[in-house]
Structure formats: structure tokens, C-alpha cells
Amino acid sequence: MSQPDNSSSPIEAKLVNPPVTETDSGSPAVGLPPDSGKEANKGRVGTDKLIQNKLLVLSCLFLVTGFLGLPLLWMNRGFSGAERIFWSVIVTIYTLILIAIVGFVLVWVYRQITIV
């Protein structure tokens, strides 16, 4: 049994399909202008503005997503670390209270149904 040489990797990467060149006639990329990436980033700029809006993020947390939206809070660069922790705790408590209220309503409804 031989030891592999440590200077080379035991795994070699091989391309399944060679890179497409402009001279390939069957290539769908022939005749297309090179993509500068501006079109792909156009929608992202608007989304980034929304994510960085503190009021919009807090509204989304309290009115729509609850604690499932905490990644939005942590992606927002407008909040400091202490604010992020504070709002994370508040939103989690708020969401748990809402879940408890729904649970109490379901138990009350179930008891009302079983009385009849």
C-alpha cells in the first residue's frame, strides 16, 4: 500500500462539460451581449433599502412574521447589538403571548362545543 503524496490533492476536479466559447454554434450564449450584472442587482437594491428601514422591519416583526422574522432584524445594519438583542427578546415574548392567546381561545371553543 502506498502513501499519497502530501503535496498534491488526492481529489482532482474534472469538468464534465468544457466551457462554452463564442465559436460554438450550438451554444445558447452565442450572440448575447455579456452580462454586466446590473440587471441582476437592480431588484436587490430596492430590497436592500426595505431591509435597512428600521420602522418597516419592526412593523414586519410585530404585524406579520413574529419571531420567524428575526433574521430581518439581524440583517438590518441600523440596529446596534444591544437593540437587536432587546427587540429579539421583545418580539419572542410578544409572539409567545399571541400563541398562548390562540391556545386559550381554542380550549374555550372546544369546551363550548363539548357542553352542547
Image (tube, rainbow, N blue to C red):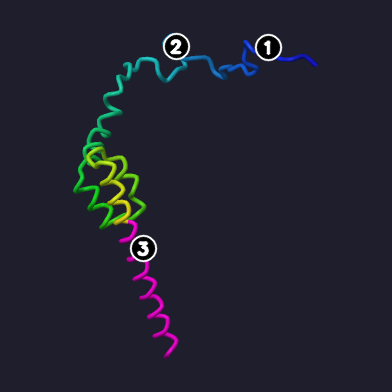
Residue type at the position of mark 2: Thr
Circle nearer the N terminus (2, 3): 2
The structure residue drawn at horizontal position 36% and vertical position 52%, both measured from the top left corner, is 68
Give x and y (percent) for residue 60.
26, 52
Disc 3 target residue: 96
Q: Is residue 114 magenta?
A: yes
Please identify the residue farthest to the right as the structure is shown: 1
Helix, strand or loop for the magenta stretch, by majority: helix
The answer to which quarter of the image holds residue 36 is top left
Distance from label 2 to label 3 (Cα)? 57 Å
Secondary structure at badge 3 equals helix
Q: Nearer the viewer, residue 30 or 39?
A: 39
Q: Are marks 2 and 3 in contact (CB under 8 Å)?
A: no
Q: CA distance from mark 1 to mark 2?
A: 35 Å
Instruction: Provide the residue designation for mark 2.
Output: 21
Within the magenta stretch, is there residue 45? no
Magenta-colored span: 92-116
State which quadrant residue 94 falls in.
Answer: bottom left
Q: Amino acid at mark 1?
A: Asp
User: Within 10 angstroms of label 2, few (less than 14), some, or many (20 or more) residues?
Assistant: few
